[in-house]
Amino acid sequence: MSRVTAKKSESTPRPPVVSLISLGCAKNEVDSERILGKLITAGFMVAEDPSEADVCLVNTCGFITDSREESAGVLRELQSLKTEGRVKSVVALGCLVERAAGAPETDGYLAHADARVGFQDYPRLEAICRELAEGAPRRPSTPEGVPVVIEDKRFQGLTAKAQSFTASYNAFLTAPRLRLGSPHIAHLKISEGCSNFCKFCSIPYIRGVQVSRPIEDIVHEARELIEGGAREISLIAQDTTSYGRDLYGSYRLSDLLRALYAIEDDVWFRLMYAFPRFLTDDMLSTLASDPRMCPYIDMPLQHIADKMLSDMGRGMLKKETIALLDRIRDVWPHGAIRTTFIVGYPGETEAHFEELLAFVREGRFSHVGVFMYSHEPKTPSARLADNVPLVEKKRRRDAIMAAQLEVSRERLRRLVGQTFPVMVDGPPGPGMAIPRGVHALARSQREASEVDGVIFLRGRAAARLEPGTIVEAAVEQSLDYDLIARPLAE
């Protein structure tokens, strides 16, 4: 939510006031920042407290059931403010709106939204908010859904109007940004949508097929973010390794990285959401060619058993996956690999799960997340029998996380006594459980913000360090997922 507080003027008329709650992933957060930037440029005021706003915007997440339920809960809570006469309208934006357009069975999650605005209507958002702020009635409407061009005949039921969407969304991605969160950490979206169509995933039905941004636009935005105080820039997309395939006709991630490396500022870069099938040796060598690129890669594998990988439509099997992991270790011997897995996918047997569990125990990953499979409407997997009971899915998830806990403990134990640069994120948050003597939180290049462990900094020197400062720190102690260190200046 924006930290800009609206001050209601005594004169009339006053500018319309909006608030925005951003849910979901970093990609959604970037959209939220641009929405606020566009509205402020158009003369709107932004309230941190929704009860002070005329129009409450919720940038929703519709990826899985849990995220849809969270979005519905926020909309319901805001609607109670309207019932009390404290706001005029509650507006749902983004992913869940698009999901409901293509999957009417999810429509109920938007029951408490007075209006719905999908991606194609973002250019009209200012006019929509003005109408709502003035009290104009607006019936909830469902957009046509994200335009998608489908080459695979299995998906020809989706809408095919990608050209207009590409133009409007690229224009949106050049709008001003009102930064949310920590100023020293920035997410830079290099493309939108996904063209892989894994059989379990709803992203193409929500965000459409891949739309890459021109290299020049991305580099220009990176410079702006650095000028605004960013010290770490995470490159994000639904599929970063496929960058450029749609725009240039070939994979151009290496070219983009080299263009970013031409920026001379002392800033960290980080690559997130890499699709393993398209991660080439050239990309790996380019990633490793500049010390400012964090030796870290976020690469969802989803499974390791050949049958599961094939059924999921991942496009590569166990042998190719292990070979890729070995090549990553060759270029980044001490780097970090983050991945996610799905347990309980239709047809996953105990043998498939045990193969995955043994794979995790090998200790190849620094960070692991696990999702329990659930049917996503309209995806090919939704036509399969969900034949793994929920209690068994939970057992499998917990077993994977327990195995990774042991891997993490051993990996971090080996770091005790080592010294390396860390970036300070700031003081611990209120109510956060912290070890004794800790005055600041930090991360090395091997941890991404918000999703991985942290480095607790002890000592009086740590208390004086500003967020975004990079210092050398010596590791004194290891925990399950975190480290305790002391700045060398201490």
Image (spheres, helix red, strand yellow):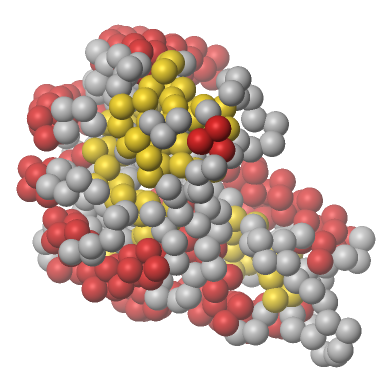
The image shows residue 415 at horizontal and vertical percentages of: 32, 19
Quadrant in the picture for the N terminus? bottom right
Query: Is residue 35 placed above or below 110 in the rendered structure?
Result: below
Q: Residue at x 64, y 62 (%)?
A: 2
272 or 430, nearer to the observer: 430
Quadrant in the picture for the C terminus? top left
Q: Which residue is drawn at 16% across and 33% down?
A: 332
Q: Which residue is drawn at 85% across and 55% down?
A: 80
**Left or right side of 347 for 91:** right
Kindly tell me whether residue 277 is visible in this rendering: yes
**Number of dots carrying numbers:** 0
106 or 214, nearer to the observer: 214
Kindly tell me whether residue 341 is visible in this rendering: no
The quadrant in which residue 230 appears is bottom left
The image shows residue 39 at horizontal and vertical percentages of: 60, 77
The quadrant in which residue 49 appears is bottom right
Q: Residue furthest front?
A: 490
Query: Is residue 334 placed above or below 147 in the rendered structure?
Result: above
Q: Residue furthest bottom?
A: 12
The image shows residue 83 at horizontal and vertical percentages of: 89, 61
The quadrant in which residue 422 appears is top left
Q: Which residue lies furthest to the right in this view?
A: 84
399 or 289, nearer to the observer: 289
Q: Which residue is drawn at 66% across and 61% down?
A: 3
